[in-house]
Image: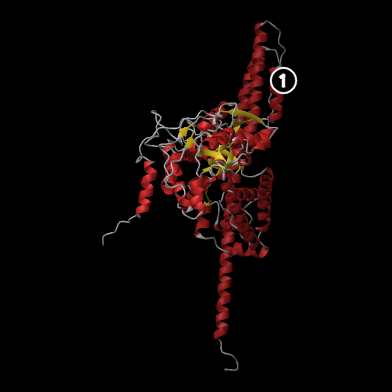
């Protein structure tokens, strides 16, 4: 079945074509009314008398919406991006601007014309304000086209406004803080939790490790049952040596495992874990690695509770750490309100001749305000150059200029805080209901503007104006930068995590070296330490001999030795060797050499005797271990035979006929 294409209503197609064209179907007109700004010459006044039209409406001859039908309206506008003239001074045919699009639609709906009878004027100078310009313009023209704020002062001056077509709400704008170069932070991983929480976590891990060991101690009955139970294949395999070096040979030449079957069972169920093991397993649980093997019901309940606690803690840590990374990459500004800027003594930029400047200076007399030429390009530049910290702008103006490279090339201007004041803005008309009846013009325009807002024309025209004026998308650019920053962390930002691990790794290496050296020292046999002492004594004897030779070479008269006999006892040999080393005769040198050789022979004899003793001790240990193994096996066999005999007797008792049957 062929799919039918959706057909839009004709009025929607026409409306969209009108918005896109921006009035291109109309001829290009230039201003035809020229009145000097702020003139007092009433003869130049272009404001028309429409009292006759009001009388026709009052008498019911025409409806309100048709009261201006056929009138050639005399509006005045300020050339800008929203009231755009080309280089020839005519209305831009491609993009006339938001205000001209609105005025063209009003003319079409109300039945008046204006393109052949409009004027232009400039912004007020430094000594004038927009309020003065609006008051003068409404007196000399039928309508003053622009985004004029609806304020109490202007209403009191006799200016009337239509339905707001421009959101001129006062907002603070400023530059986002540029992210500084990341620095190495060793403690960045601690930021998700406060110090008190980390203290509680450490205490919980330590206390849980100790408590688990207490709760995991089996009762005597459980211990007895566990010892009787034969280990599983996996338990037995874990206790088996991986190579023959871990096995011993008994006196009959058979290989016997160092750990027997009974030993494997006892190692599994007789308290093999320590408190240190419990604390280590408890700390691993924080990283979601459950390694507990509880043996009792209380320890099982406690380990389940610990698992739930670790799950909740680690989930909160992961979520908070991710949010911290996102917040770090979010553009922020230190000032969030006008009060913050005033309290910190910072300057605030305002459009010096606008109603916003009048409002801010009257409401915040203690503030430091800097006047600029507008509330967009000049204000953006002043904030960026440091002339002021923030600025007060109209919300619609900020939306209009923030995505223009000419005003915001770096996309660093952002809206700060909340709206200061909600202010509608629109065209201005003289409030005159009797002299020239200009109020009729305001009423007719207001009626059609309400219709245009209801059917969505104003919103569509504003969005079309934004799309034509924007040449970049700062929101998408900032979002992309935030995603890239959130997805990838620099080496400096993550260096703290690596350094923490490096510190612990170095500490582990040092601990490994110290423990190995200490274990090696403790395992040093008495034979090796005795050999070390004998080596030192031999060096002393050799040094004595050299001194004897030096003395003979110096023609000194040596003394004969008192004795040249060596006792078989090692202590006498040591004292005698030292005595002869101190003698000063030539024969003493030869005696010292003989003593050194004698000590070496005695050392070899002692080493042989020590090795023989060690072999005997090792053999005794093997025999004792084999005896324990045989005894345990015999005990298990006897228990098995006894159980078999009891079962056999019980079976015979059940099968034996009773005396009653006999």
Query: Does the rendering let one see residue 173?
Result: no
| Mark 1, residue position | 579
Q: Which residue appears farthest toward the top when viewing the image? A: 555
Q: For mark 1, does the 10 Å Cα neighbourhood hold few (<14), some (14 to 19), or many (20 or more) residues?
A: some
Q: Nearer the viewer, residue 288 or 628?
A: 288
Q: Is residue 434 left or right of residue 540?
A: left
Q: Residue at x 43, y 38 (%)?
A: 97
Q: Nearer the viewer, residue 629 or 151?
A: 151
Q: Is residue 27 left or right of residue 124?
A: left
Q: Nearer the viewer, residue 597 or 258?
A: 258
Above or below, 623 relative to 648: above
Q: Is residue 210 left or right of residue 446?
A: right
Q: Residue at x 66, y 33 (%)?
A: 361
Q: Position of residue 597 (x, y in %)?
A: 60, 24
Above or below, 544 relative to 222: above
Q: Position of residue 605 (x, y in %)?
A: 60, 33
Q: Position of residue 318 (x, y in %)?
A: 56, 47
Query: Does the rendering let one see residue 592?
Result: yes
Q: Which residue appears farthest toward the left when viewing the image? A: 1
Q: Nearer the viewer, residue 450 or 330?
A: 450
Quadrant placement of the N terminus: bottom left
Q: Position of residue 237 (x, y in %)?
A: 50, 55
User: Total number of numbered labels?
Assistant: 1
Above or below, 7 relative to 37: below
What SS does tag 1 mark? helix
Quadrant placement of the C terminus: bottom right
The figure's colour scheme reads secondary structure
């Amino acid at each position: 079945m062929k799919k039918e294409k959706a057909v839009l209503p004709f009025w929607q197609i026409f409306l969209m074509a009108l918005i896109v064209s921006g009035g291109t179907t109309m001829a290009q007109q230039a201003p035809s009314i020229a009145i000097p700004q702020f003139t007092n010459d009433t003869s130049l006044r272009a404001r028309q008398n429409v009292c006759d039209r009001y009388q026709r409406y009052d008498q019911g001859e025409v409806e309100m919406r048709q009261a201006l039908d056929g009138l050639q309206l005399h509006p005045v506008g300020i050339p800008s991006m929203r009231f755009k003239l080309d280089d020839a001074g005519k209305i831009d045919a491609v993009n006339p601007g938001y205000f001209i699009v609105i005025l063209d639609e009003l003319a079409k709906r109300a039945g008046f014309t204006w393109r052949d009878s409009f004027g232009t004027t400039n912004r007020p100078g430094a000594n004038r304000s927009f309020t003065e310009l609006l008051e003068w313009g409404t007196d000399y023209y039928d309508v003053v086209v622009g985004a004029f704020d609806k304020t109490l002062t202007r209403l009191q001056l006799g200016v009337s406004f239509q339905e707001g077509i421009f959101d001129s709400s006062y907002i603070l704008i400023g530059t986002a803080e540029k992210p500084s170069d990341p620095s190495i932070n060793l403690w960045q991983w601690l930021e998700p939790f406060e110090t008190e929480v980390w203290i509680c976590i450490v205490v919980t891990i330590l206390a849980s490790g100790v408590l688990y060991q207490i709760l995991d101690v089996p009762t005597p009955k459980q211990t007895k049952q566990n010892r009787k139970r034969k280990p599983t294949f996996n338990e037995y395999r874990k206790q088996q040596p991986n190579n023959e070096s871990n096995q011993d040979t008994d006196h009959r030449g058979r290989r016997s495992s160092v750990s027997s079957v009974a030993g494997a069972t006892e190692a599994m169920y007789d308290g093999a874990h320590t408190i240190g093991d419990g604390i280590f397993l408890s700390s691993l649980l924080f990283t979601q690695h459950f390694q507990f093997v509880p043996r009792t019901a209380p320890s099982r309940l406690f380990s389940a509770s610990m698992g739930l606690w670790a799950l909740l803690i680690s989930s909160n840590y992961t979520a908070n750490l991710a949010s911290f990374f996102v917040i770090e990459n979010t553009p922020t500004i230190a000032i969030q309100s006008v009060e913050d800027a005033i309290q910190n003594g910072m300057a605030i930029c305002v459009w010096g001749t606008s109603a916003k400047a009048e409002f801010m200076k009257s409401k915040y007399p203690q503030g430091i305000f800097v006047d600029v030429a507008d509330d967009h390009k000049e204000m953006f530049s002043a904030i960026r150059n440091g002339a002021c910290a923030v600025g007060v702008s109209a919300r619609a103006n900020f939306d209009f200029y923030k995505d223009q490279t000419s005003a915001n090339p770096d996309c660093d201007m952002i809206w700060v805080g909340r709206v200061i004041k909600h202010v509608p803005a629109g065209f201005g008309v003289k409030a005159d209901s009797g002299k020239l009846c200009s109020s009729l013009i305001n009423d007719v325009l207001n009626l059609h503007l309400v219709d245009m807002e209801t059917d969505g024309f104003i919103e569509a025209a504003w969005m079309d104006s934004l799309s034509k004026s924007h040449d970049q998308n700062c929101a998408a650019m900032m979002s992309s930068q935030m995603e890239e920053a959130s997805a990838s962390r620099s080496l400096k930002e993550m260096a703290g995590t690596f350094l923490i691990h490096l510190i612990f790794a170095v500490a582990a290496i040092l601990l490994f070296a110290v423990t190995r050296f200490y274990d090696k020292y403790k395992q040093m046999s008495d034979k090796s330490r005795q050999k070390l002492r004998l080596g030192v004594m031999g060096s002393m004897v050799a040094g004595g001999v050299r001194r004897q030779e030096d003395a003979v070479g110096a023609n000194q008269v040596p003394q004969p030795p008192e004795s040249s006999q060596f006792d078989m006892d090692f202590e006498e040999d040591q004292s005698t060797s030292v005595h002869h080393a101190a003698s000063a005769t030539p024969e003493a040198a030869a005696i010292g050499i003989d003593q050194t050789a004698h000590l070496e022979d005695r050392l070899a004899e002692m080493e042989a005797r020590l090795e023989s003793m060690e072999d005997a001790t090792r053999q005794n240990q093997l025999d004792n271990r084999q005896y324990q193994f045989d005894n345990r096996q015999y005990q298990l066999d006897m228990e098995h035979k006894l159980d078999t005999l009891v079962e056999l007797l019980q079976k015979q008792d059940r099968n034996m006929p009773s005396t009653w049957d006999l």
